[in-house]
């Protein structure tokens, strides 16, 4: 059969039908109303707290936190309705600030900010961006966790009402994105972000993906509560970036409801694991680091010694803001841990390297197909390389044999696989 990728420049892939277990995709639900109606309905019916218009009547200064360009949140369709609520409560624009919760990511460009927030927001408000490694930009929280220092952006203590804007999808580190994530890692310091990632190291794949109640989420919620997060507005969007659900209100209660809705959208039943798992990282492919949102679902679907094929653009290479990832790669766990112990690597970097090591070395191998990553770069980091998906699949069949079973995950960053048989 011919398989057509969401990347329109790729030639169709010929997959032997006798080998194919199935092509799986989530996030195909369609909205039942306009974005405006879905968002305003959530704001008019907040979970666990009064409406923003009521909260605004008792508020002097508001801080709106919004995730960055690496996340799906259509903030330009959400923030204007938040502002309407705040204005209804008597707040004027000069008492409202907007901060991009970028975690450890690079700063957004002006063009990216316009796409994310909308031109009218950019023209009306001074939009600031979080700096995770500038001490003067941070202040400490009373959080005790394995000697880590928990710092958050100083602007949080200057606000009476803090609103987090994000999107909910199954996530390989925290169970789900959204909710309190806007604080940790969104506007936290490097040490706290590292501690959060390190806490997840013994939970991987199906042990954390799409599971909200976990120790990482408990830490995130604790930090957000102590940082003063009052309110969230979180969307759930489909693969076409259309808003299909929105939740608003208490950061814990609203996020729990949003995670339930997201599970219905993104959970996919898969009958068994496969010898070859091919996936695309469409819209999760700024760099190879970001494609991990698709790699982890692929890992869940791999048999032991399987081959995973990663098809992604990766215009910013292996890792756009952490060159050490490309320098050292995923080949040798002892080297990774030695560099971590000598503090060459930040815990976030080590977590990522170890996670990918589990996929490309412990459980199997990974063939990279990307315009943005060269053969030399892929092979240096420990990946195999192919120019086209067909070349990659042909190579995988050479490795695993002509009768190897195949699974295809479409838009893999939006999939939470549920395997019918849990055995490898």
Image (cartoon, rainbow, N blue to C red):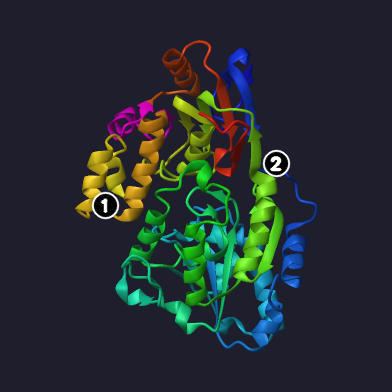
Q: Nearer the viewer, mark 2 or mark 1?
A: 1
* Element marked by disc 2: loop
Which residues, given as a range, are shown in magenta? 365-384
Task: Indicate the secondary structure of the residue bearing disc 1.
Answer: loop
Residue 284, how many percent across, how many down?
A: 51, 44
Q: Residue at x 51, y 63 (%)?
A: 218
Pointers 2 and 1 in contact (C-beta within 8 Å): no
In the image: residue 136, left or right of residue 402: left
Q: Which mark is residue 345?
A: 1
Q: Position of residue 322 (x, y in %)?
A: 32, 50
Quadrant where the image shows the N terminus: top right
Alpha carbon separation for disc pair 2 and 1: 39 Å
Q: Position of residue 8 (x, y in %)?
A: 58, 31
- Say how many tags the image has: 2
Mark 1 crowd level (few <14, some 14–19, many ≥20, 10 Å Cα) = some
Q: Which mark is residue 28?
A: 2
Disc number at residue 398? none
Dividing the picture into quadrants, the one containing residue 423 is: top right
Whether residue 96 is situated above or below residue 114 in the rendered picture: below
Does 158 sit left or right of 42 as displayed?
Answer: left
């Amino acid at each position: 059969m011919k398989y057509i990728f969401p990347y329109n420049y790729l030639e169709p892939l010929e997959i032997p039908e006798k080998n194919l277990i199935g092509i799986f995709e989530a996030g195909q639900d369609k909205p039942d109303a306009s974005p405006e109606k879905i968002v305003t309905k959530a704001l008019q019916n907040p979970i666990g707290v009064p409406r923003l218009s009521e909260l605004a009547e008792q508020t002097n200064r508001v801080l709106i936190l919004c995730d960055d360009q690496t996340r799906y949140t259509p903030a330009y369709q959400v923030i204007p309705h938040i502002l309407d609520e705040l204005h209804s409560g008597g707040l004027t624009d000069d008492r409202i600030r907007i901060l991009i919760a970028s975690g450890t990511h690079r700063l957004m460009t002006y063009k990216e900010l316009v796409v994310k927030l909308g031109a009218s927001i950019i023209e009306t408000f001074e939009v600031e961006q979080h700096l995770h490694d500038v001490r003067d930009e941070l202040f400490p929280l009373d959080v005790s966790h394995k000697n880590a220092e928990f710092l958050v952006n100083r602007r949080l203590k200057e606000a009476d009402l803090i609103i987090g804007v994000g999107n909910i999808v199954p996530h390989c580190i925290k169970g789900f994105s959204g909710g309190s994530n806007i604080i940790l890692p969104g506007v936290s310091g490097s040490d706290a972000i590292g501690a959060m990632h390190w806490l997840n190291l013994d939970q991987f794949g199906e042990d954390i993906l799409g599971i909200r109640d976990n120790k990482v989420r408990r830490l995130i919620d604790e930090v957000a509560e102590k940082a003063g997060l009052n309110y969230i507005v979180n969307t759930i969007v489909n693969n076409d970036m259309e808003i299909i659900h929105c939740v608003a209100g208490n950061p814990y209660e609203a996020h729990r409801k949003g995670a339930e809705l997201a599970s219905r959208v993104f959970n996919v039943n898969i009958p068994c694991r496969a010898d070859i798992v091919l996936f695309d990282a469409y819209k999760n492919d700024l760099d190879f680091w970001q494609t991990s949102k698709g790699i982890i679902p692929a890992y869940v679907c791999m048999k032991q010694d399987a081959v995973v094929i990663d098809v992604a653009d990766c215009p910013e290479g292996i890792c756009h803001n952490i060159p050490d990832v490309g320098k050292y790669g995923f080949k040798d766990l002892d080297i990774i841990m030695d560099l971590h112990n000598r503090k060459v690597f930040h815990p976030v970097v080590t977590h990522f390297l170890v996670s990918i090591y589990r996929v490309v070395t412990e459980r199997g191998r990974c063939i990279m197909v990307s315009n943005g990553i060269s053969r030399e770069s892929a092979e240096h980091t420990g990946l195999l390389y192919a120019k086209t998906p067909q070349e990659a699949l042909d190579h995988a069949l050479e490795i695993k044999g002509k009768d190897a079973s195949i699974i295809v995950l479409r838009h893999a960053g939006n999939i939470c696989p549920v395997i019918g048989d849990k055995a490898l």
